Image (cartoon, helix red, strand yellow):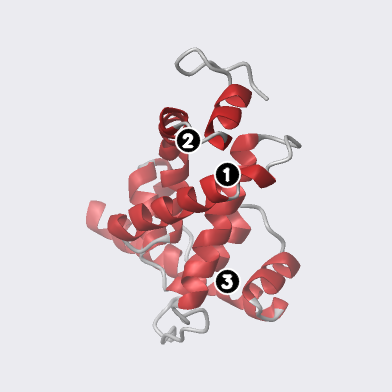
Amino acid sequence: MSPLLVNGKTEKDLIKACLSGDRQAQRDVFYMYSGKMMAVCIRFSRHRQEAEDLLQDSFVKIFTHLKDFENKGSFEGWIRRIIVNTAIKNNLKKSVIAEEIDLDHIVEEMSVPEVFSVLSEEELIKLISGLPDGYRMVFNLFAIEGFTHKEISEILNIEESTSRSQLTKARKMLKEKVNDLYKVAV
């Protein structure tokens, strides 16, 4: 637990107050973490409204299951895990994990590493958000959240080879999009 104070309360005090139904403490917890967690939601969503809905659904789950937080590890990490799991379940509900697209037009080897230094974080997030749902899920879980292909296969109920394939295709699509941006910028 961090000694962080919000309205004179530590994180531990806020959790205890939330458990007793204190609405102000719930607002404080929401405002303390919603910014960072919105960034996670945006990466797993196609557009801002979907990300906002995901954030709201996640915080409902967080407050509903707060009694299950055992003060082991960080509270922020626990919240993040709920956000990621909610995003995964949301995407699985849409039944688009196995989405197929025509990748014949993607150039096999395309590398423009200098472009990454000129792209803003917002532009990169927009590129990732433009990936097909299945690719975006695997890319986020592997490249950003740090899951292994084995863990991803278990979470998404797909083969490890499918996880690897979708990651490769996601990377190729991102390279193409970056290359297109680079051509326009030159």
Tag 1 near tag 2, CB within 8 Å: yes
Q: Could you tell me residue 159's position as x and y percent?
A: 70, 81
Query: Residue at position x 52%, y 53% from top?
Result: 61
Residue 124 percent coordinates (x, y): 39, 51
Q: Position of residue 135 (x, y in %)?
A: 50, 71
Residue at the disc numbered 2: 33
Foreground residue, 147 or 18? 18
Marks 3/1: CA–CA distance: 29 Å
In front of the other: 77 or 160:
77
Q: Which residue is mark 1?
A: 79
State which tag comes first along the sequence, 1 or 2.
2
Left or right: 90 as drawn, with respect to 71 = left
Which callout, 3 or 1, points to the residue nearer the camera? 1
Amino acid type, callout 3: Thr
In the rendered image, the quadrant that contains the N terminus is: top right
Question: Which residue was labeled with disc 3?
Answer: 168
Residue 127 seen anywhere in this rendered image of the structure: yes
Q: Amino acid at mark 1?
A: Ile
Residue at image location 66% in from the left, 69% down from the top: 155
**Label ID, residue 149:** none
Secondary structure at badge 2 equals helix
Q: Residue furthest front?
A: 20
Distance of label 1 from label 2 (alpha carbons): 8 Å
Taking the spot 64% from the left edge, 80% from the top edge, the residue there is 162
Q: How far across and how far down the image is residue 89, in percent?
A: 53, 68
Q: Horizontally, is 70 left or right of 21 in the view?
A: right
Find numbered disc 1 in the image and state the secondary structure of the residue it sits on. Answer: helix
